[in-house]
Image (tube, helix red, strand yellow):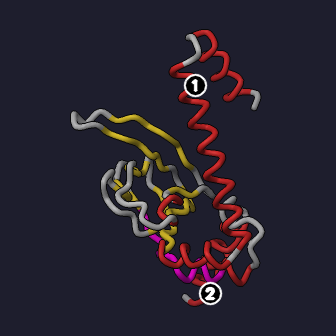
């Protein structure tokens, strides 16, 4: 049993080390991050977080897929991101006074997730420059992407939106 646990830990370590959020961090720090995590499984269509809840962890996807989405009072949903193995979500919780989540997170198919304690990651962001840079890079990327989407919706005509979609999907 101990060998199986050790093997699983090594697998987590390898996966985390390849991720954008934990890129460039030493192995011992990645091990510490795992120690502040909880391995959880989510069934298809199970919510990790509901819009309006206060998140307590950042989700690191080991297997499966998650979506982030927003919903209105009528229950209509808009998918924001599709996430897969090696990606994270709910990074914004690491900023103080962020409040309730503006999004929901749901499993698209059976998924395994490391739920990494938000308080621990907040302390890490305050003490580790590499982790902080990684976090800022991720958030800046999604901010730029959101601005492009807003431009596409409000400024570009249908032909330009289609062209941009095809470029993003197949060339960039």
Name which of mark 1 and mark 2 comes first in the sequence. 2
Where residue 43 sits in the image (x, y, percent)? 38, 56
- Picture residue at 66% right of the left edge, 72% below the top: 11
Quadrant into which the C terminus falls: top right
- Picture residue at 67% right of the left edge, 16% below the top: 163
Residue with the most extreme bottom position:
2
Q: Residues within 10 Å of mark 1 (few under 14, many from 20)?
A: few
- Picture residue at 71% right of the left edge, 84% below the top: 28
Where residue 30 sits in the image (x, y, percent)? 67, 77
Residue that badge 1 annotates: 151
The residue segment tinted magenta is 31-41
Residue that badge 2 annotates: 3
For this rendering, which residue is in front, 32 or 66? 32
- Picture residue at 68% right of the left edge, 69% below the top: 131
Q: Residues within 10 Å of mark 2 (few under 14, many from 20)?
A: few
- Kind of element beneath mark 1: helix
For this rendering, which residue is in front, 121 or 6? 121
Where residue 135 sits in the image (x, y, percent)? 64, 61
Q: Is residue 116 magenta?
A: no
Q: Is residue 37 magenta?
A: yes
Rendered position, 158 above or below 30:
above
């Amino acid at each position: 049993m101990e060998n199986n646990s050790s093997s699983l830990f090594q697998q987590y370590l390898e996966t985390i080390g390849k991720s954008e959020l934990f890129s460039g961090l030493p192995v011992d720090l990645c091990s510490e991050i795992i120690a502040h995590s909880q391995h959880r499984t989510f069934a298809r269509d199970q919510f990790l977080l509901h819009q309006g809840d206060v998140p307590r962890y950042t989700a690191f996807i080991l297997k499966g897929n998650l979506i982030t989405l927003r919903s209105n009072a009528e229950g209509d949903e808009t998918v924001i991101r599709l996430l897969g193995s090696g990606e994270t979500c709910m990074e914004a919780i690491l900023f103080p006074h962020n409040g309730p989540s503006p999004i929901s997170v749901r499993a698209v198919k059976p998924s395994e997730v490391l739920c990494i304690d938000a308080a621990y990651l907040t302390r890490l962001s305050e003490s580790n420059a590499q982790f902080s840079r990684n976090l800022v890079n991720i958030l800046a990327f999604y901010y730029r992407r959101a601005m492009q989407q807003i431009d596409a919706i409000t400024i570009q005509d249908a032909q330009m939106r289609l062209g941009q979609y095809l470029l993003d999907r197949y060339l960039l």
